Amino acid sequence: MFFLLFGMRTKDDLLDTRVLTCEVCGWTAPQARFARTTRFTLFFVPLFPVAPRKYLLRCGHCMSLRQIKPLPAYA
Ligand SMILES: [Zn+2]
Protein backbone atom coordinates (compact mmCIF):
# COMPACT_ATOMS: atom_id res chain seq x y z
CA MET A 1 0.00 0.00 0.00
CA PHE A 2 1.30 3.43 -0.92
CA PHE A 3 0.36 6.69 0.76
CA LEU A 4 0.92 10.05 -0.86
CA LEU A 5 1.35 12.69 1.84
CA PHE A 6 0.87 16.21 0.56
CA GLY A 7 -0.33 19.53 1.91
CA MET A 8 0.54 23.19 2.43
CA ARG A 9 2.96 24.91 4.77
CA THR A 10 2.99 28.60 5.61
CA LYS A 11 6.20 30.13 6.90
CA ASP A 12 6.93 33.65 8.14
CA ASP A 13 10.45 35.00 7.61
CA LEU A 14 11.44 37.98 9.76
CA LEU A 15 12.92 40.67 7.51
CA ASP A 16 13.61 43.51 9.95
CA THR A 17 12.28 45.36 12.98
CA ARG A 18 11.92 49.12 13.29
CA VAL A 19 10.41 51.47 15.83
CA LEU A 20 7.39 53.12 14.21
CA THR A 21 3.99 54.45 15.17
CA CYS A 22 1.34 51.73 14.90
CA GLU A 23 -1.62 52.55 12.66
CA VAL A 24 -3.96 50.44 14.81
CA CYS A 25 -3.17 51.37 18.43
CA GLY A 26 -1.23 54.60 17.88
CA TRP A 27 1.70 53.61 20.13
CA THR A 28 5.32 54.02 19.07
CA ALA A 29 6.59 50.44 19.33
CA PRO A 30 8.82 47.99 17.46
CA GLN A 31 7.19 46.91 14.20
CA ALA A 32 8.42 43.58 12.82
CA ARG A 33 8.22 43.09 9.05
CA PHE A 34 7.57 39.53 7.86
CA ALA A 35 7.48 37.83 4.46
CA ARG A 36 4.80 35.10 4.45
CA THR A 37 5.17 32.26 1.94
CA THR A 38 2.80 29.32 1.43
CA ARG A 39 4.34 26.26 -0.23
CA PHE A 40 3.04 22.93 -1.49
CA THR A 41 4.58 20.04 0.45
CA LEU A 42 5.10 16.43 -0.54
CA PHE A 43 6.07 14.07 2.31
CA PHE A 44 6.53 17.18 4.50
CA VAL A 45 9.12 18.64 2.12
CA PRO A 46 8.21 22.14 0.86
CA LEU A 47 8.52 22.16 -2.93
CA PHE A 48 7.13 25.30 -4.58
CA PRO A 49 5.09 28.37 -3.61
CA VAL A 50 1.37 28.22 -4.34
CA ALA A 51 0.45 31.79 -3.42
CA PRO A 52 2.15 35.13 -3.98
CA ARG A 53 4.42 36.23 -1.16
CA LYS A 54 2.75 38.56 1.35
CA TYR A 55 4.50 41.19 3.41
CA LEU A 56 3.14 41.75 6.91
CA LEU A 57 3.83 44.21 9.71
CA ARG A 58 3.30 43.13 13.34
CA CYS A 59 3.06 45.67 16.15
CA GLY A 60 5.07 44.85 19.26
CA HIS A 61 2.50 46.55 21.52
CA CYS A 62 -0.94 45.39 20.35
CA MET A 63 0.29 42.40 18.23
CA SER A 64 -1.93 43.47 15.33
CA LEU A 65 -0.91 42.04 11.98
CA ARG A 66 -1.54 43.98 8.80
CA GLN A 67 -0.53 43.52 5.19
CA ILE A 68 1.80 46.10 3.65
CA LYS A 69 3.22 46.78 0.21
CA PRO A 70 6.18 44.60 -0.92
CA LEU A 71 8.79 47.36 -0.53
CA PRO A 72 7.40 49.90 1.91
CA ALA A 73 8.93 53.34 1.86
CA TYR A 74 9.00 53.86 5.61
CA ALA A 75 12.00 55.19 7.46
ZN1 LIG B 1 -0.20 48.53 17.70
Image (cartoon, rainbow, N blue to C red):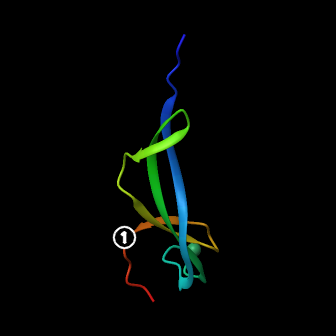
For the view shown, which residue lies furthest in the right direction?
61
Q: Nearer the viewer, residue 74 or 50?
A: 50
Labels in figure, total:
1
Q: 33 above or below 10?
A: below
Q: Amino acid at mark 1?
A: Pro
Name the secondary structure under disc 1. loop
Please tell me which residue is depicted at 40% across the width and 46% down the height of the picture. Answer: 48
Q: Quadrant of residue 55?
A: bottom left
Q: 15 above or below 40?
A: below
Q: Quadrant of the C terminus?
A: bottom left
Q: Quadrant of residue 69?
A: bottom left
Residue 50, x across and y down, in percent: 37, 45
Residue 3, x across and y down, in percent: 53, 19
Residue wearing tag 1: 70
Residue 2, x across and y down, in percent: 52, 15
Q: Crowdedness of circle 1 by 10 Å Cα count: few (<14), some, many (20+)?
A: few
Residue 22, x across and y down, in percent: 53, 78
Q: 19 above or below 1?
A: below
Q: Quadrant of the N terminus?
A: top right
Please tell me which residue is depicted at 53% across the width and 53% down the height of the picture. Answer: 11
